[in-house]
Amino acid sequence: MTEKDAIVARHSVRQYLEKPIEAEKIEELKALIAECNREGGTHMQLVTNEPKAFAGGMAKYGKFSGISNYIAVVGKKGDDTNLGYYGEKMVVRAQMLGLNTCWVGMMFSKQPDSYQVLDDEKLLCVIALGYGANQGVQHKLKPIGDFAEVSGPMPEWFRQGMEMAILAPTAVNQQKFKFVLRDGNRVEAQSRFSLIGYAKLDLGIAKYHFEVGAGKEHFEWC
């Protein structure tokens, strides 16, 4: 399975089976987290066999169940876009490993003994992880034109990037992002105002999707 295949196949899953994740998959995820933390300056951490985060009333209200594994999305304060980018890199790899995921912003209970958050950092959210009781469902997709600004004909690489970007998971499916093509091959990623919040995190997720679709060799961020 390629990254594009994983992006297309992946949907948010809230209910999980009581099935442990194999040791070799745990190790692969840990290795990628370490790589992302080095490259992006993040402090993401894999938490396993810890059911308390999703045992409270908020999780039940959100219809979460069976979750005992998750990624703590920890990083520098104000680094939301970067955390979204590298967190989604983990999500896509998990899908390639046959696992299911869900970004969770508020409907979990913090467990400070299970991960480390330094003084200049924050726990932005978590990513539920495991074997889903289902594969989730695809939300209705909006037209690419709602999220793209291009003067003249749209290059094929840009179109492919946008096809992946509109599949990006966002808070309550708000999709408050836009990609603007400038000077031939320069792309500006913009976040729009959101009353719900998480727009910067969502922008990072969409940026990762765009890169996978467009190919890094075809453009540069501006």
Image (tube, rainbow, N blue to C red):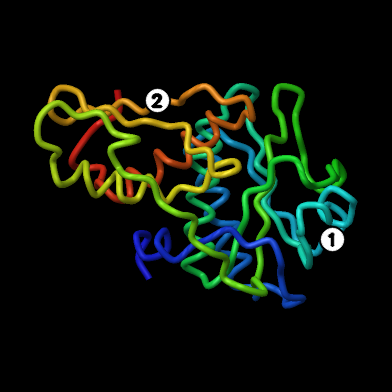
User: From what the image shows, is residue 213 above or below residue 105?
Assistant: below
Check residue 51 in the rendering and tell me which mark sits there, or answer none: 1
Asked if residue 105 lies left or right of residue 92, the reply is right
Residue 127, image x, y percentages: 65, 51
- Residue at image position (28%, 37%) is 145
Identify the residue shown where x is 73% and y is 61%.
Answer: 69
- SS at badge 2: strand
Question: Would residue 136 be found to the left or right of residue 190 on screen?
Answer: right
Q: Quadrant of the N terminus?
A: bottom left
- Name the amino acid, label 2: Gln
Q: Position of residue 138 (x, y in %)?
A: 48, 60
Mark 2 neighbour class, 10 Å CA radius: few under 14, some 14 to 19, many 20 or more = some
Q: Secondary structure at mark 1?
A: loop
**Label 1 to label 2, Cα distance in Å?**
36 Å
Q: Which mark is residue 190?
A: 2
Q: Quadrant of the C terminus?
A: top left
Which circle's residue, 1 or 2, is located before the other in the chain? 1
Front: mark 1 or 2: 2
How many numbered discs sit on the rendered protein?
2
